[in-house]
Image (tube, rainbow, N blue to C red):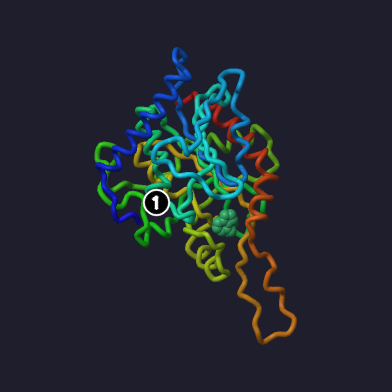
Amino acid sequence: MNTNWDLGEERVKIEKASEYLSERFQERFQNEKFEPRALIICGSGLSGIPDKLNKDKLEPLVIPYELIPGFKRSTVPGHSGNLVFGIMNDYPVVLMSGRLHGYEGNTIQETVFPIRVLHHFSKGGIKTLIVTNAAGGINSEFKPGDIMCIYDHINFPGLAGLHPLKGPNFDDIGPRFLALSDAYSHDLRKLLFQTHNELKMDRPLHEGTYFFASGPTFETRAESRMIRILGGDSVGMSTVPEVIVARHCGWDVLALSLITNVAVIDHPPSGKIDTPVPMDYGKASHAEVLENGRIASKDVETLISTFVGKLHYRE
Ligand code: HPA
């Protein structure tokens, strides 16, 4: 937690970053009208989403995080760090290609800073957050490669005090005590399931509760069992802080977990037996997460880009 959190200073940082984006917009779009309506945060293995932008309609504007005042860079292999403005299926969007995690050493405010900046910059034009993540499967029905639409979450670090809205509140943006019982839009989830049916996608699309763990370790067996008992269906190290701040900004949220591995739930083999199941059976690895993310990513990208093309109904 950043103990030097100061709302005034934070506003100045947000305004500075937003001014920088305005200048880049002015340079690039001049007379063209381009106003992004949705932010898509591309998680692990979903870095190909920028290829779904219609370059013939509008050459995307790519702004590296390191050029934007106050933005931190992503340090995770497999994530880049660019804001990309463009058109996806006739809908104007901005992509965060590469996201910021707390486990990289960013404060929780730094991980949500891009949302605050884009809210300020778009002057209320952005109304939707679409966010994807890689996650471990906790629900016993889930297999690597499945997709889960998030309909609720457990903010474990948040319940213990590591919360993105802790500290002084931006009263002009959202309430001090934000309700989260409606965090994941029912309309958007319906539209996603409809899109999945229309595409006749074989890859299963589940619905469930995402458990946010701060990472960077994968869970122990006992932790995975605890998460299952508490009602988590998937577990990952991101998304929830961004979702909370997006809801605080009044945006609607659609969030997906790509199940990249399944949790090991059984107790470890006992030291009292000679020939146990090997200890490393089912053990999670970042390589497995990236590989399963890569295999499923084409479908997730198709699902998301088709879905985005249907967002016009909300205008
Ligand atoms: N646990 C936490 N985060 C993850 C996992 C996992 O098993 N897989 C991908 N991200």
Residue 288 at what x, y percent from top left?
67, 55
| Quarter of the image that includes the N terminus | bottom left
Ligand 1 is in which quadrant of the figure? bottom right
Q: Is residue 42 left or right of residue 31?
A: right
Q: Residue furthest right?
A: 275
| Quarter of the image that includes the C terminus | top left
| Residue at 42% from the left image edge and 49% from the top image edge | 241
Q: What's the amino acid at mark 1?
A: Ile
Q: Is residue 158 left or right of residue 275?
A: left
| 78 or 209: nearer the viewer | 78
Q: Residue furthest bottom?
A: 272
2 is higher (above) or lower (below) than 311: below
Q: Which residue in the structure is indicated by mark 1? A: 108
Q: Residues within 10 Å of mark 1 (few under 14, many from 20)?
A: many
Residue 143 visible here = no
Give the tally of numbered discs.
1
| 144 or 6: nearer the viewer | 6
Residue 238 visible here = yes
Mark 1 lies on a secondary structure that is: helix
| Residue at 30% from the left image edge and 56% from the top image edge | 3
* The quadrant where residue 276 appears: bottom right
Residue 74 at what x, y percent from top left?
51, 46
| Residue at 60% from the left image edge and 23% from the top image edge | 54
* The quadrant where residue 7 appears: top left
Residue 24 at what x, y percent from top left?
44, 25
52 is higher (above) or lower (below) than 76: above
89 is higher (above) or lower (below) than 141: above
| Residue at 62% from the left image edge and 30% from the top image edge | 52
Q: Residue furthest front?
A: 67
